Amino acid sequence: METHNDFNLGPEEIRALERTYLFSTYKRSDLYCAHGEGAYVRDIAGRRYLDFLAGISVNSLGYNHPRIVGALRDQGGRLIHCSNLFYNPFQGLLAQKLAGLAGMERVFFTNSGAEAMEAALKIARAYGSARGQGEKSRILTLRNSFHGRTLGALSITTQEKYQAPFRPLIPDIGVVEALTPEALAGAFSDRVCALVVEPVQGEGGVFPMPADFMQAARELCDRHDALLVADEIQCGMGRTGKFFGFEHYGIRPDVVTMAKSLAAGYPLGAVLGNGRVAGSLGPGDHGTTFGGGPLACRVALEVLAVIEEEGLIRNVREMGDYLVEGLRALARNHPLMGEIRALGLMIGVELGAAARETVDRLLEKGVIANAAHETVLRLLPPFVITRKECDLFLETLDGVLGGIESEKPRPS
């Protein structure tokens, strides 16, 4: 079989190498990615797949956007890495741009979302320590949240399947059990140094926060001198139809975490802070070897320019509305489909026990999607998605759901 990769490896060789040498941390589908263009990725045999997952909200500009490839090539030929002991031309420019977009004052760059969350947790504890003589250290998180897999981020990721093997986790974490102002108020005290919220819970099944909950979050954090931390790792960078998810709620957090699509596929994360936390970390309090390198920051600046100049946030809103309209039309004919939840191009469709089978059958038909929280079809297409590609997805989903429903036993 002809293969489309430089090492000329076939599927069996790839699987054997991974089975022998990798920790078995991923349950992979039988797709062997080789290259891509636009909203499509090709496997090593050259078959094309429409990507409605975008690398789990990473490939916001699709694959091989010419301006991103150009920035990578140009900067890669100049300077890939220099230590954070020295300056590079792009870190300050990117920090200025992000701070302006978020209404923040300070930025720290990381390699990933989990690292950004670790930095945010340290900022929260440092803030509380400076104000509570060691008594203001409690961090609140939400039931069903996901913030990452490092030990600190995992400690506020309140899903049993992720936490169970790794306890004991970091102490002094409180869980808000319901997305209501009353439940949130009941969890607060003056011992709380921070509340961490995803404006849209992604891994938990695509749940946008209720507006009254977010407004209560801001009010309670102000009342108790606590930080409101917005986890924008998945829902930021325009994914919801606004640059940040928190903008839908008319509030502004104190700290924002970012990653995933920040450099559209090149590893980069960031934590942003307002004036309240600007002095929370000083020299030696935190650091990173790779975070904020010249190549990553140069690419991220190009990503931001493309999003703005190509009007992609407008396209996110328009295509998000178009997809939701199409999904609701499908739901009238498919009893498997339950609630449809969406903000922009962050969409979840309740499918119950059929979610995983739906994802597998879509892949067989050449469409990539994902099952979140076991029961939800999660859709995160790239910002460059077109109406024609949305129609292809809807047509494929219609056929897949029809096939699953036709095979279900009829009630006697």
Image (tube, rainbow, N blue to C red):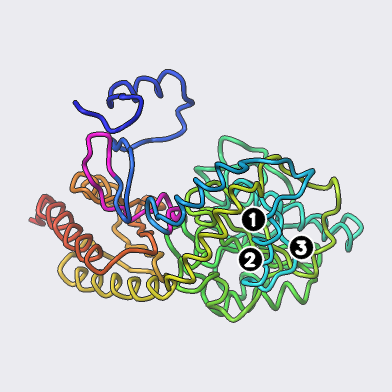
Q: Earlier in the sequence, mark 3 or mark 2?
A: 2
Q: Check disc 2 and report its element: helix, strand or loop.
A: helix
C-alpha separation, residue under disc 1 versus residue under disc 2: 9 Å
Which residue is label 1 attached to? 270
Left or right of 113: which side holds 358? left
In the rendered image, the quadrant that contains the C terminus is bottom left
- Disc 3 marks which amino acid? Val
Whether 124 is drawn above or below 310: the answer is above
C-alpha separation, residue under disc 1 versus residue under disc 3: 24 Å
Eye-nearest disc, 3 or 2:
2
- Disc 2 marks which amino acid? Leu
Q: Is residue 52 magenta?
A: yes
Q: Earlier in the sequence, mark 1 or mark 3?
A: 3
* Furthest residue toward top: 20
C-alpha separation, residue under disc 3 versus residue under disc 2: 27 Å
Residue 347 x %, y %: 37, 64
Left or right of 86: which side holds 17? left
Eye-nearest disc, 1 or 2:
2
Residue visible at 22% across and 34% down in the picture: 45
Residue 296 x %, y %: 59, 49
Q: Are marks 1 and 2 in contact (CB under 8 Å)?
A: yes
- Magenta-colored span: 42-60
* Furthest residue toward right: 133
Left or right of 207: which side holds 218? right
Q: Which of 370 and 91 lies nearest the eye of the viewer?
A: 91
Query: Residue 98 shows which numbered tag?
Result: 2
Residue visible at 21% across and 28% down in the picture: 2
Q: Quadrant of residue 93?
A: bottom right
Whether 200 is drawn above or below 411: the answer is below
Q: Is residue 340 magenta?
A: no
Which residue is label 3 attached to? 192
How would you rate the neighbour count of disc 2 (Cα within 10 Å): few for under 14, some for 14-19, many for 20 or more? many
